[in-house]
Image (tube, rainbow, N blue to C red):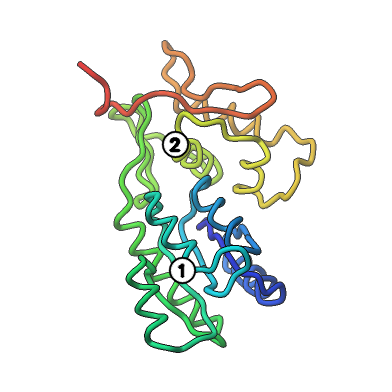
Amino acid sequence: MPQVLLIEDDARLARVLTQGLLEESYQVDVARDGRLGLERMLTASFDLCILDVLLPTLDGFEVLKRAREQGVTTPVLMLTARDGIADRVRGLKLGADDYLIKPFAFAELMARLQVLLRRGKMAVDKLSAGEVTLDPGAHRVWRGEQEVELSHKQFMLLELLLRHRGQVVSRAMILKRLWGYDFEPGTNLVDVHIAHLRQKIDAPDKPSLIQSVRGGGYRLQGEPEADKQP
């Protein structure tokens, strides 16, 4: 399920786009100003970003500029009510992947997002920790030479932990990204999925790659095999 960051201050448009994207099986995280949107881009992993140009606190150009300077490679589609060529050129030079002028048809937005998503999947490198390797584009996982069969949610959970390898991923963040909850509903849903994931990816004679962090969440440890010193 693709993860989309929508940075848009127009409440009505954000609501319409969020509903449409959810109906198309996308998960959506909404930021209502530029500074918050930049923070989300720098601290979380997304498959796509829809970025408005005219935003409070930081405009879309500045958000994009700072994100690219910090190494964020997420495909970005910029939205603007201005159709001047200079603005479009500026956005593309700063690292935008596509541009859409308001007003637009939702069908055109979806077509452009699907192109960016396919392009992004083709360029995504494999993720790994210890003996575990995940290929986001092919949607496959291996432990050593053996392929591991994961459910869709287990795959999403492992990918999230791998993209934040060495960092604490809170239960609230996992619930938000995998199930769309904006709050922690007092369920053991995350713990159950972590337990099932451990059973599938951990080697019997080695400590679990996924550490429990008291009061915080979970942290995936382990260097990629290629990074280890002989």
Q: Which mark is residue 61?
A: 1
Choose top left, top right, bottom left or bottom right for residue 37.
Answer: bottom right
Residue sitting at the far right: 186
The amino acid sitting under disc 1 is Phe
Question: Which residue is more in the foreground, 116 or 149?
Answer: 116
Query: Is 172 left, or right, of 88 in this rendering?
Result: right
Residue 197 position (above or below residue 76): above
Q: How far across and how far down the image is residue 28, in percent?
A: 60, 60
Choose top left, top right, bottom left or bottom right for residue 29.
Answer: bottom right
Q: Residues within 10 Å of mark 2 (few under 14, many from 20)?
A: many
Report helix, strand or loop for mark 1: helix
First reached walking from the N terminus: tag 1 or tag 2: 1
Query: Is 229 left, or right, of 180 in this rendering?
Result: left
Residue 148 position (above or below residue 102): above
Q: Residue at x 39, y 80 (%)?
A: 88
Residue sitting at the far top: 205
Q: Which is more foreground, mark 1 or mark 2?
A: 1
The amino acid sitting under disc 2 is Leu
Report helix, strand or loop for mark 2: helix
Residue beneath disc 2:
162
Estimate the spatial distance between the alpha carbons at disc 1 and disc 2, rounded to whole Å.
Answer: 29 Å
Q: How far across and how far down the image is residue 136, in percent?
A: 38, 48
Q: Residue at x 24, y 28 (%)?
A: 226
Q: Residue at x 51, y 53 (%)?
A: 41
Q: Residue at x 42, y 81 (%)?
A: 87
Q: Which mark is residue 45?
A: none
Q: How many marks?
A: 2
- In which quadrant will I find the C terminus? top left
Query: Is 144 left, or right, of 154 in this rendering?
Result: left
